[in-house]
Amino acid sequence: MAVPIEALFVKNRLPSGPSLLFILLYTPLGIVIFLLRLFVSLQLFLAASVLPYNTVIRSVVLRVLYVTLGLVVREESVEKRNKSCCVITTNHITPFDHLAVSIVLPCITPSVYDLPAALSMLLCYRDLGVTQGREILRTNARAYLSDSRNPPLLLHPEGATTSGTLALMKYGSWAFELSGSVLVAGLRVWRIPLLQIAPSVLGASWAADLCFMLFSPVTVFTVSYIGEMRRGESETPEEYGARVQASTAEALGIQATNHTVADKVEYMKRLAREAAASSNPLLSPEVHIMAQQVQEVLPHISLDQIKRDIVRTQNVDITITNFLEGNIPEPIPEPQPLSPNPVATTSQLSHSSSSSPSSSSISISKTTTQPSTSLGGAPSVSKATLETSSLTGTLKQAGSLSTAAECFGKSAAERMTSFQARKEQLIQNARRKYIEKHGLQLPESC
């Protein structure tokens, strides 16, 4: 059964339910322990920094320092430990995994932080150019391993931390290109069940993990040795890494997955987008997609206006109806009228008059007629004037998207009639735009 990427990480530092009550009761004592450990560890840290490297007294001081921090290390299957191996691989749970391993097995791990040389040595770090690229890291690591006097190199092939309780991420092949044999070990982290504080959570910094380690009563690291594993003659680094990953997962009683560091980064980005969308619904991808659907029908309305109404209605059809009927609290911009080409418009009308009998009556008289007077003395409108006004109305209907009223009605009935006409025109304009955009072919009866 495939393990989803979400199951590999812990997102909440503190538990819920009754365990949270125990943590609240422990908080005053935890703060006192935190301050005492901070003060004592600072003294031991300064003492260890001035002592000669790789001496017995310095090792004793470091062990006392780690115990003061609440870091206790246990070993399992010690008979499988081979100190002659120059490369050690383990899974990755916290930023302090290398410190736990270095207590029982002196080693150095590549540094991902820009620290002074003395501080890096005290924390069992070595600058091998991790931030400068994979090729430089390989070159510096091979140069480091070429000196047999150097302590073993501890690597975390996963490349990022996980909870370590359900599955392992895919082991990177670069860690298995450095040596033909590696000492494989698995790590587990344990804390008091009544105070279930996660050792590391998704997106947390090393400083936050350190503070909670000082706050917790004890943090027990268990190093389970799996033994030395050699690379086969015809085995590629990828196959070698997959075999080591499977052996580590089997020893820890968890699964091996194909999720990589890139998958974790994408998952963190997705969580960040979801958090931003929850705090501001206008940034939601679903709202943006629905707003684009509305704008296809009503292109003259801004996307921001549509999004604000979509957040309120959560329905594309209701939002379109609200804009068409004017049920929007903010003003809606009028669609900009088109500027049709006179030649193209005349040719369209000529084509329409030749193909549609109903439009054959639309023509412009070239003869000039004088206005006549009826028996009552009132001037009568000429046929040319009627035809010209009919043509003007047809041009408006064919080439303009404006729905503005020409004048304000004097009575409520006139204003209602004008409103219904403008509403019908707006619906027709929107319908025509949608048909033209999607290239729909309607039956002749339509």
Image: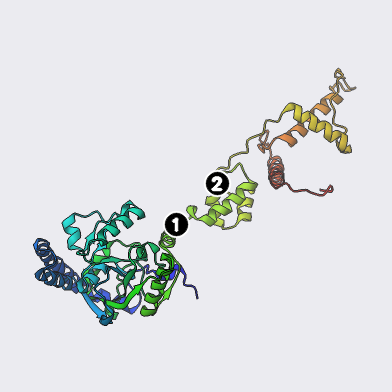
Spot occupied by residue 440 in the image (x, y as percentages of width and height): 74, 48
Give the residue pinned by disc 1.
273
Horizontally, residue 325 falls left or right of residue 285, namely right
Helix, strand or loop at mark 2: helix
Element marked by disc 1: helix
Residue 322 in sight from this viewpoint: no
To which quarter of the image does residue 393 belong? top right
Residue 445 higher or lower than 361, as above or below: below
Mark in front: 1 vs 2: 1
- For the point 59% across and 57% down, which residue is it? 315
Determine if residue 367 is in view. Answer: yes
Mark-to-mark CA distance, 1 and 2:
20 Å
Q: Position of residue 94 (x, y in %)?
A: 30, 68
Is 395 located above or below residue 436 in the figure?
above
Residue closer to the observer: 219 or 388: 219
| 258 or 366, nearer to the observer | 258
Q: Position of residue 438 (x, y in %)?
A: 70, 48
* Mark 1 residue type: Arg
Relative to 3, residue 424 above or below: above
Q: Which is more toward the observer, 41 or 354?
A: 41
Residue at the image point whose x is 9% and y is 70% from the top:
57
Dot 2 corresponds to which residue? 303
